[in-house]
Amino acid sequence: MSEVAADAGSNATILPEPVRQRVLALAAQALGAMPATDIPAPLRRFASFAPAKRAKLSASVLGPILDTDERFRRLVAIEVRREHPELGDAVADAVPTPAADPAEVAALAYLIRPEDWQARVAEAAQVPKAAPKADDEAIARLGEQLDQARTETRQIRERLREQLAEVKAENVTLRRKLNEARQRIAGLQSDLADRTAAADTADERVDAARAESERELRKLRARITELEAVEHAARRTAGQEREFASVRTRLLLDTVIEAASGLRRELALPPGGDLRPADTVAGVEPSAEPVGRSAPDDDPSLLDELLALPQVHLVVDGYNVTKTAWPSAPLHSQRQRLLTALGALVAQRRIEVTAVFDGATLSGPVQLNAPRGVRIRFSPAGVTADEVIRQLVRAEPPGRPVVVVSSDREVADSIVAMGARALAASTLITRLARG
């Protein structure tokens, strides 16, 4: 170890080896506790090392920086005093420390820099080194132990080499198996992805097929419901038509029978059993005027004659009559007055009466007290009362007497062409006024 020498022309300080080693150890210890911003750039890579490794590896850089970077040295001194508060305070206050290690005191003095720091460093340099005591037996014993340790170390090293070779071979085998396993896993994953995609596609196809089947099923059900409704309507219509045909036939038959009976009474014909073949060879006989033709069309008595016909059906153009009879009265009042009068007529003559009104003038449901025996019809949307009257005439079987009361010339002409009899509204009004 050499003494401290300070060159007046240089900033470098030569420290005794024990002091230098202790300074580096203390600075390396403090380096780990300092923030990165306070550490010079060349030392930052050593800050994360272990203290012993940090002191060993950073020695060549840490010593010159401590000697030249005053700020960094003061920061290191602060950390060292925090770790060694009593001895650091004694060194800073120049208090004698005879019991302390001179190298420790010199290292702290070098970092803290009190006024007598150079003297403390010089004192540490003057401390004589303790003479080593040689012990031949101990040296021999230690030599034997060293040789034995070296032999054991070689054996252990050989075993470790063998184990390392086995581990390397096993590692190679494991790596190969791992690669094979990875390849199999990759293949399985690829196959799984393909199967998953195929399953998803199959699910989509199944869902599409199910949806299509459900749509077809709904269509078939709707078609079945529609066909059932058509069948039900057809059956109902067929039954109604059969019933209607039977009614028409029965009504026509009753009309023919009553007309024949009336004609027989009118003509005073003898019973059928009195007819002889010679009677069919007779010449032309005078024909009687048809019933209902004996009075002019505007004569109210003509209506009585027509109503006397068997199974006669009286159809009344409602508003055509009411607006002629009571033009200033409200429509509901007109309808009720006409229906009341027609009810009285039905009670007298026992005839079938239908009153037809135009439904286009209605703003809502109609509450009517229909007399017994009087049928009331309002024309549906888009259909006139005149057309409903024509439908009623067409619905009657040919040969049944139908009388239509309407002053509408077009209606009268059309129903006459269909075989019915037309009378003016005034004829019915006069008849109803007579009571």
Image (cartoon, rainbow, N blue to C red):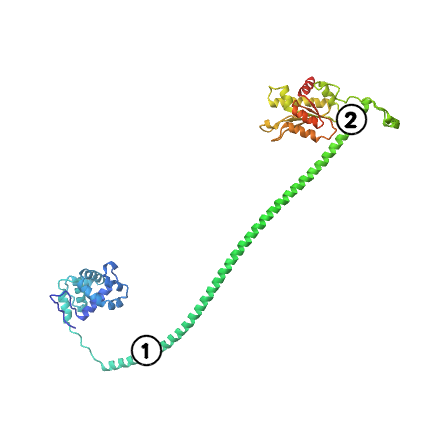
Q: Is residue 35 visible?
A: no
Q: Amino acid at mark 2?
A: Ala
The residue shown at (51%, 60%) is 195
Residue lying at the far left in this picture: please name it: 8
Residue indicated by mark 2:
259
In front of the other: 133 or 39: 39
Q: Amino acid at mark 1?
A: Thr
Residue 83 coordinates in the image, percent (x, y): 23, 62
Please tell me whether residue 209 is drawn above or below residue 236 in the rendered image: below
Alpha carbon distance from label 2 to label 1: 148 Å
Q: Is residue 395 left or right of residue 177?
A: right
Q: Is residue 356 visible?
A: yes
Residue 363 coordinates in the image, percent (x, y): 58, 28
Disc nearer the start of the sequence (2/1): 1
In front of the other: 407 or 124: 407
Marker disc for residue 153 = 1
Q: Residues within 10 Å of mark 1 (few under 14, many from 20)?
A: some
Q: Do the residues under discs 2 and 1 have CB atoms within 8 angstroms?
A: no
